[in-house]
Image (cartoon, rainbow, N blue to C red):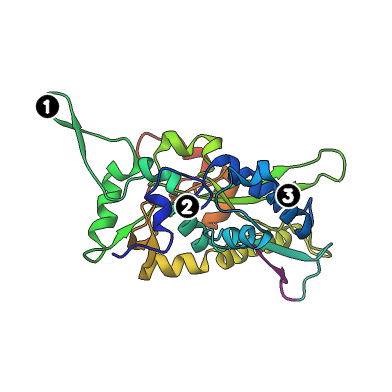
Amino acid sequence: MDDDEHADICNTENLHYPFASKSEFDLACWLSGGALSQKEIDGFLHLKHISLPITILHTTKDLQAWIEGLPEVPRWYHQQIKVGSYKTKVPLWLYWRDGLDIVKHLFANPVFTPCMDFRPYREFEGPDRQQAYGEFMSADHAWEIQDKLPPGHSFVGVIGASDKIPLTIGTRNKEMHPLLILLANIHAGVHMKATSHAFVLVTYLPIPKFLEVSRPIHSILLARVYHFTISIVMHNLKMAAHNGCIMSDPRGDLRMIHMPLIAWIADYPEQLLIACTASKRSPISLAVSTQFGDPLPHSP
């Protein structure tokens, strides 16, 4: 398909485009940080020893124009969450970014060009040509997904990750519950490095404290809030997974992409919460805790 408007970024070796170099990019970041007024920025850029190496920044308007021309990053939204007539200790606010925007942002990142697979493949090794499995796109599941898509359509596998994290212990026991998204098409050796920023924060899930309810009802309400907030964040992503969405890849080419959920990284209590399963049971089968470790698999 045709290139997108930012394809020129991918066709150059300069990752700081439209700025000429990293030093110019760092200077623009510092100038836009609010340390100087617009008049002071203009005076700074007109200094002789500053203006000589700078090729595109001459005035504040130039700086603002180049910043506004950069590809947008996913925006943050916020909304209040209410659960019927039930009261909470503090109002529930959801701070979130659209899951589809996050996937588009990751898929279009030129940094991942050499380490992202766009179609399923098979690898064989040894004299007997046994199939070898490595990255996600070499798995049989990737072929099964691709075979169900219309001709000319591709897909990126979405991996979700969430976990409740304690912030303070002994001082009001503050917690946060981040939800992150990763693309399975990115090579594992890359997305496991924190410096690659392959895991992107989508939202902080609310952790409500309901008033005047019993413990069982409180647990049910917590589950309701959990699923309701995730449905808000993932609504557009679920629609695009079914119908497809035109997205720019890291090379700047437009593709019709579907984005099925491949996996969800969570601890055991959260797995039960996601599967709507009672405690001491398997989240993926009919097995109970006493049957964990049985040699034969149980029915799903």
> Does residue 83 show up magenta in the picture?
yes
Q: Earlier in the sequence, mark 1 or mark 2?
A: 2
Q: Secondary structure at mark 2?
A: helix
Quarter of the figure with residue 253: bottom left
Rendered location of residue 295, percent (x, y)? 36, 34
Which residue is found at the position 63% from the left and 43% from the top? 26
Give the side of residue 231 with respect to residue 299, left or right. Answer: right
- What's the residue type where badge 1 is placed? Asp
Q: Secondary structure at mark 1?
A: loop
- Disc number for residue 44: 3
- What's the residue type where badge 3 is placed? Phe
Which residue is found at the position 45% from the left and 44% from the top? 14
Rendered location of residue 6, percent (x, y)? 43, 59
For label 1, the residue is 128
Rendered location of residue 51, percent (x, y)? 63, 47
> Which class describes the residues within 10 Å of circle 1: few (<14), some (14-19), or many (20+)?
few
What residue range appears in magenta? 76-84
- Please identify the residue farthest to the left as the structure is shown: 128
For label 2, the residue is 106
